[in-house]
Every structure is written in C-alpha cells, then in structure tokens.
Image: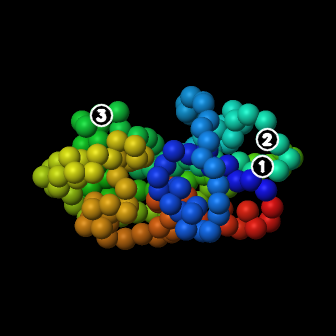
Amino acid sequence: MKLLLASQSPRRKELLTSLGFEFEVVKTDCEEILPADIKIEEAAAYLSQLKADTFRSLSPDEILLTADTVVAIEDKVLGKPADETDAKNMLRHLSGKTHQVYTGITIKTQDRVFTETDVADVTFDEITDGEIEFYIQKYQPFDKAGSYGIQEWLGMAKIKNINGSFYTIMGLPTHLVYKILQKI
C-alpha cells in the first residue's frame, strides 16, 4: 500500500517519518470554511474530512492521510493568523489561560474512511508583549493555528501545563494514526 500525506506541514512530515512510515506528499485543493453552526470539538475532524473528500479518487493500493488542527479558547476558534497584528492578538488572548487544541485526522482508502479527533488542554504562563514580539519576529508563526508551535521557543518557555498528547498539539495525533494504519 502506498501512503499519501495530504499536508504541507513540515511537522506532520517529521512525525509521520518518525513513526516509521514511508509516504508521498500530495496536495488537496479545498476552501477550509467551517459551517457557522459547527461545534468547536467537531471542527478539526470536519476540515480533515473535507480535505479527504476533495482529493482525487484513490486507487486500490493507496491510503490517504489528511489532518487539521484547531485551537480554541472561550468558545472561539483561532485559526492561522492573517498577519502580524492578528498573531499578536491571538497570543495576548492565550496568555495566562488554558485553551484546547483539537487535531482531526482522516485516513481513507478506496472503500473505507476513518475520521477521529484528539484534544489536548494547554495552559500558558503570562506572556509579555516583548516576548510576543520576540517570538513572532524570530519564529514567524503564520502557518500555525493559534499563532504558536509547541515545539518552538514559546512552547518551551511559556507552556506550564499540558493535559493530552504533545503530538496532537504539534498537529498529528500519532497514536491515532498508528492505530488506524495498523488496522489497514
């Protein structure tokens, strides 16, 4: 079977490689828009499934893996920041609080589809404006939901508690991916 990873995320590529899987990176072309009435805990799975549904037909020897990560705080979804100001505002909002990170995955074959979501709670210490400025200038977190990467400086210096999988926060719940791929 040939595994296809429909993600441009370097973190997902690294994690899937570390799990010991060989794969080919492919692109999906879909507009990632959430329905207005969707529950936050269903958003990541919805987007992951949407990506899988818009991908071309699979051949019998192919397996497609799609994923999406959503950061949520106080019933609000924080996507990828539009610009530097947006990133600063997101990080100020996360400062000193606990938020949730949901990562949904879809694993699809020609005749089966598995979609699951994992969630982790993340608690930040207070983050000063100077620390936010440093982080944004040095790490450019514009491709990350919630404007941060747990594996980068901000995660190392300011996250004081995690309840859940570190890898879910990084963008790929490796334990779920492994379990489902072993079934297939």
Q: CA distance from mark 3 to mark 2?
A: 36 Å
Disc 2 marks a residue whose amino acid type is Leu
**What residue is shown with label 2?**
58
**What residue is shown with label 3?**
83
Question: Sequence-wise, which precedes: disc 3 or disc 2?
Answer: 2
In the image, residue 59 above or below residue 31: below
Mark nearer the viewer, 3 or 2: 2
The image quadrant of residue 56 is top right
- The structure residue drawn at horizontal position 62% and vertical position 42%, both measured from the top left corner, is 26
In the image, residue 91 above or below residue 182: above
**What residue is shown with label 1?**
62
Quadrant of the rendering where the N terminus is positioned: bottom right
Look at the image and tell me whether residue 100 can be seen.
Answer: yes
The image quadrant of residue 83 is top left
- The structure residue drawn at horizontal position 37% and vertical position 56%, both measured from the top left corner, is 149
Tell me the crowding category of disc 3: few under 14, some 14 to 19, or many 20 or more residues within 10 angstroms, Cα based: few
**What label does residue 129 carry, if any?**
none
SS at mark 2? loop
- The structure residue drawn at horizontal position 79% and vertical position 36%, both measured from the top left corner, is 57
Q: Position of residue 34 (x, y in %)?
A: 56, 34
Do the CB atoms of the residues marked 1 and 2 lie less than 8 Å apart? yes
- The structure residue drawn at horizontal position 17% and vertical position 48%, both measured from the top left corner, is 133
Look at the image and tell me whether residue 124 can be seen.
Answer: no
In the image, residue 179 above or below residue 62: below
